[in-house]
Amino acid sequence: MKKLRIGIIGAGGIAQGRHIPAFLSLSNICEITALSDVHIERAKEVAGKYTIPGVFEDYRDLLPKVDAVCICTPNKFHAEISIAALKAGVHVLCEKPMALNAEECQAMIAASEKAGKVLAIAYHYRFMKEAQAAKKAMNEVGKPLVARVHALRRRKVPGWGVFTNRSLQGGGSLIDFGCHLLDLALWLMGNPKEIAVSGTTYHAVSKIPNQVNQWGTFDHETFDVDDHVTAYMKFENGASMLFESSWAANIKDDYANVSISGVDGGLSVFPFELYTTKNGMLVNSQAAWIPGEESPDVPQAKNFIDACLGLADLVVNPEQALQVSRIIDQIYESGGNHL
Ligand SMILES: NC(=O)c1ccc[n+]([C@@H]2O[C@H](COP(=O)([O-])OP(=O)(O)OC[C@H]3O[C@@H](n4cnc5c(N)ncnc54)[C@H](O)[C@@H]3O)[C@@H](O)[C@H]2O)c1
């Protein structure tokens, strides 16, 4: 079988830390044939390090050389590059968030449908073993009633890249970190349609000069994104969600989890635990994990390749990623000015 030719667009942290190693480990079914970055010296250096033959400054020159691309650029370029790739007949795995807003996501889906090519979004939390276990266990939870979503870091504003630049990223803690846990919760709930979304956004901590920060330094003056967000959502099936994300919370420890209470039982994803009743008793269950693949990176890459080859359905359907972006838009719209 011919190997799928993959192109990497954007050769920064996530490309080197996740996608390039994942695709390289699947060398029986794919090969990374090209890489592009507007920072051409970085492109050359990374291509040399991983022995990638084609190096391009402009992603448009890469498209004719590949069957699929993995888009690892700042959020602002996700839609433009995805649409150009799809129009060129190239499958797309795009980093999260899908795009800056829901309108851009819809244009990406339209391009994918027109081209008949795969459009996958890298919500990799879904491929974690705890998330996969939780998805299977939802039949014991029954109809979901309340989801609690936390994506909280203590004083960890990313001090590198462009994460604190609204025009390039579209937002801060919510669109960057909260989106993962929001996506995971919606997926576990069966992606019910949202009917009401209300949020509040903050950046008071990060606007103070010389803040204590565990992940490098950033300029408090140019910081123009949220560092803490709360939201409440109602869904048309009667379920509701309590949501909180932060890069800079004044809390004891980082805390990232989704917990869901349903009619028959409940669960927590991190750590994975199931709360049910049996024989007139309350029962708490934990998984005894079978040793194997621990990282979600390779399963995510494999699912994308299999979908491109027509061998599997996508785990992350682009319509579901669009819902995440639609809810993020509504939280930002209702959040008003940052406090
Ligand atoms: N899934 C996750 O958990 C996760 C983690 C980190 C980052 N990300 C996402 O990955 C994306 C990139 O993040 P990063 O941390 O790798 O950032 P980064 O700043 O380390 O790398 C981005 C790279 O893209 C390049 N670039 C910018 N515009 C380009 C363009 N038009 N064409 C080609 N290259 C371009 C930059 O020169 C840079 O090398 C973001 O969308 C981010 O949200 C996801």
Image (cartoon, rainbow, N blue to C red):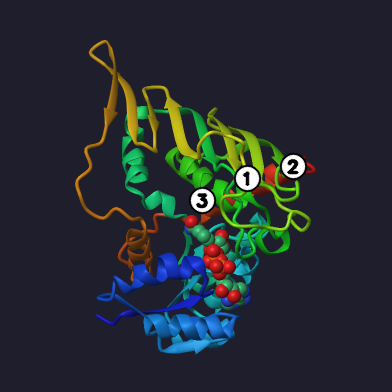
Nearer mark to the viewer, of 3 and 2: 2
Tell me where residue 117 appears, x and y as whole percent: 46, 71
Nearer mark to the viewer, of 2 and 1: 2
Quarter of the figure with the N terminus: bottom left
**Disc ID at residue 327:** 1
Side (left or right) of 31 relative to 237: left
**Disc ID at residue 320:** 3
**Disc ID at residue 204:** 2
User: Element type at marker 1?
Assistant: helix
Q: Nearer the viewer, residue 89 or 261?
A: 261
The residue shown at (74%, 54%) is 220
Vertical order, 2 against 222 (above or below): below
Contact between marks 1 and 3 (CB within 8 A): the answer is no
Q: CA distance from mark 2 to mark 1?
A: 23 Å
Tell me where residue 174 appears, x and y as whole percent: 61, 47
Vertical order, 113 against 44 (above or below): above
Q: Is mark 2 within 8 Å of ligand 1?
A: no
Quarter of the figure with the C terminus: top right
Side (left or right) of 202 relative to 51: right
Tell me where residue 314 appears, x and y as whole percent: 39, 58
Contact between marks 2 and 1 (CB within 8 A): the answer is no
The residue shown at (50%, 31%) is 147
Q: Earlier in the sequence, mark 2 or mark 1?
A: 2
Q: Amino acid at mark 2?
A: Ala
Q: CA distance from mark 1 to mark 3?
A: 11 Å
